[in-house]
Image (cartoon, rainbow, N blue to C red):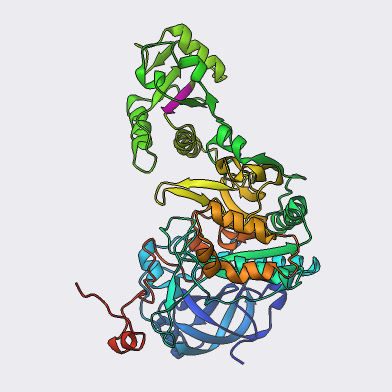
């Protein structure tokens, strides 16, 4: 046996036992004639003791151990004289009488500690070493525990787990596909699934009733902290259900996860908010409700009340009240102005009103508005002495609200109002069925083209499709969209109408989705589904800033795996087999 025990399980009750441990050398310390070695494995750390007085050769061997050497040690469990309350095994140590080096190690490029000296790129290059750090390993253990809890919950609800193909046909609607050339079909390509959407709908036609899959999905899109080229979904579909059935069931699953993982009791039922209300109050379809600073519309208070043309020509004027920030310096206010002017935010400028602690008012638009107008604005915003009003305007209401949302989140961070140990969850409902794409210059499906329109709005599909609401719902936690889904269209005629509004010709619809349309002709049941982003869910419950920290082998911000050096060029022979020519210019 390589080991009788792990490095995390021995306690004072084990004193006197002969044990064998195996693991990695965390650190060594020589003190007089004694050498102490901290031995680490996945389960914890145990202190090994080598005594020069009893076995000099063995002690010399221990003194040659380097960090991350993989070793086996045999010895007797003894009570420690100087106990370490910070270690679970801190009451005992092992008096070693046999040491075997299983594998030596080069000096690692960064310290294998919770607070390491390695930067992101270096740690990603040596991810197999980074995963030895307990702070990283705990995230993957949490991920494992969550998947077990999810599987057990869904199994108890009579869901069946079905694996769907990873090599499928391309569906250009939505994000970009990753494509895979087919050697046996030259010039033709598979796509990696952005989600198992159509396949799980086919399972409903097949009578599988309740399906789930912890599915790998792929999207070739620009990356940020909560996106990766490949990610994992908890993908679910149900037959013979309405929106409330889906929301109620998966709300219970979320409630179970928060209780089991964090000991948090979510309210019952969770708040539901329409998309229009969320945009009006927070400028986001995933509002962070951990703090206030709700938007206040100020058109009536400003428009035509002064000579400020920017406001007089605006179609939307709105602001937030930052509590206790009236003492912001000119430098701090300039930083906020620069922030909203960044291309990522896109505002033209920022107006502020300081409601000073002594009751006086100072504003960046003093020369355009009377004190009475500014007082009316502060009253509308429920501002108190010491508060700071921050105001944006624009010609497009929703676009300006989105800009104001960025400012609101920034202020929430600055004021420490976005506590990772506080969880505010809600459902967003009644999304628009379509959204306008400037890039495509046409209406696109807000979620996907199989989303059911609100039955009350179906008559609007011809004349005013932009007004049609979707039977769709998103689960939002702390300003992050964790999951989302919708009722699906199961009527062939309505699905054809949906494709028509999206600009599909009948031929294109048939070519891309004919398999689904034909399946619907064979008694398709009413069905609905939902998918949670597992990476996002784990990162929220683990209190992480990025989903990369809960993925075993993530990509960097450029979509590269720096450990495997992927993507990489193919050998000419491989390209020739695939009938692919690379333009070397």
Q: Nearer the viewer, residue 115 or 160?
A: 160
From the top left corner, tell me how far across and down residue 35 is, in percent. 47, 77
Residue visible at 80% across and 65% down?
Answer: 157
**Looking at the picture, how far across and down is residue 544, in whole percent?**
53, 55
Image side of residue 469 versus residue 348, left or right: right
Name the magenta segment's main secondary structure: strand
Q: Quadrant of the C terminus?
A: bottom left
- Residue 494 in view here: yes
Would residue 338 be found to the left or right of residue 324 on screen? Answer: left
Where in the figure is residue 435, as x and y percent of width and height? 51, 46
Question: Is residue 390 on the magenta stretch?
Answer: yes
Between residue 456 and residue 195, name the one nearer to us. 456
Res 213 visible: no
Q: Quadrant of residue 290?
A: top right
Query: What segment carries the magenta color?
Result: 388-394
Picture residue at 45% right of the left edge, 85% below the top: 59
**What is the quadrant of residue 327 in the picture?**
top left
């Amino acid at each position: 046996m390589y080991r009788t025990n792990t490095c995390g399980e021995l306690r004072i009750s084990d004193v006197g036992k002969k044990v064998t441990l195996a693991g990695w050398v965390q650190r060594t310390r020589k003190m007089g004639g004694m050498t102490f070695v901290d031995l680490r494995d996945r389960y914890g750390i145990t202190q090994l003791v080598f005594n020069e007085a009893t076995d000099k050769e063995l002690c010399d061997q221990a003194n040659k151990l380097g960090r991350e050497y993989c070793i086996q040690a045999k010895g007797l469990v003894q009570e420690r004289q100087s106990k370490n309350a910070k270690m679970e095994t801190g009451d005992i140590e092992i008096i070693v009488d046999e040491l075997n080096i299983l594998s030596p190690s080069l000096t690692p490029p960064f310290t294998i500690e919770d607070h390491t000296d390695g930067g992101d790129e270096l740690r990603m290059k040596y991810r197999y070493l980074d995963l030895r750090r307990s702070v990283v390993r705990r995230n993957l253990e949490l991920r494992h525990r969550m998947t077990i809890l999810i599987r057990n919950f869904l199994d108890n609800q009579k869901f069946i787990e079905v694996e769907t193909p990873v090599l499928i046909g391309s569906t250009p609607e939505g994000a970009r596909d990753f494509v895979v050339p087919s050697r046996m079909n030259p010039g033709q390509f598979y796509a990696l699934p952005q989600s198992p959407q159509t396949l799980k709908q086919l399972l409903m036609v097949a009578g599988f009733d309740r399906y789930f899959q912890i599915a790998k999905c792929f999207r070739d899109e620009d990356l940020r902290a909560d996106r990766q080229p490949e990610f994992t979904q908890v993908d679910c579909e149900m037959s013979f259900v309405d929106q409330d059935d889906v929301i109620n069931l998966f709300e219970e699953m979320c409630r179970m996860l928060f209780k089991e993982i964090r000991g948090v009791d979510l309210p019952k039922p969770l708040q539901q908010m329409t998309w229009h209300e969320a945009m009006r109050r927070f400028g986001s379809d995933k509002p962070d409700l951990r703090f206030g600073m709700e938007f206040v519309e100020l058109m009536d208070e400003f428009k035509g009340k002064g000579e400020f043309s920017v406001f007089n020509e605006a179609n939307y004027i709105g602001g937030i009240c930052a509590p206790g920030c009236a003492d912001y310096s000119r430098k701090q206010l300039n930083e906020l102005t620069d922030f909203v002017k960044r291309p990522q935010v896109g505002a033209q400028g920022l107006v502020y009103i300081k409601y000073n602690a002594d009751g006086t008012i100072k504003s960046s638009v003093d020369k355009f508005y009377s004190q009475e107008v500014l007082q009316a604005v502060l009253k509308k915003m429920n501002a108190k002495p010491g508060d700071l009003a921050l105001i944006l305007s624009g010609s497009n209401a929703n676009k300006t609200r989105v800009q104001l949302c960025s400012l609101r989140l920034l202020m929430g961070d600055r004021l420490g109002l976005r506590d990772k140990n506080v969880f505010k969850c809600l459902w967003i409902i009644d999304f628009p069925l379509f959204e306008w794409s400037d890039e495509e210059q046409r209406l696109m499906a807000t979620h996907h083209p199989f989303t059911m329109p609100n039955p009350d709005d179906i008559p609007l599909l011809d004349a005013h499709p932009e007004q049609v609401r979707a039977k769709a719902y998103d689960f939002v936690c702390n300003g992050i969209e964790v999951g989302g889904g919708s009722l699906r269209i199961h009527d062939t005629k309505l699905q054809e109408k949906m494709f028509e509004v999206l600009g599909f010709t009948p031929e294109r619809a048939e070519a891309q989705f004919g398999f689904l349309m034909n399946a619907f002709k064979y008694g398709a049941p009413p069905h609905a589904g939902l998918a949670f982003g597992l990476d996002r869910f784990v990162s929220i419950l683990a209190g992480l800033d990025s989903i990369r920290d809960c993925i075993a082998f993530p990509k960097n911000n450029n979509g590269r795996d720096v450990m495997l050096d992927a993507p990489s060029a193919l050998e000419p022979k491989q390209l020739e087999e695939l009938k692919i020519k690379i333009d070397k210019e």
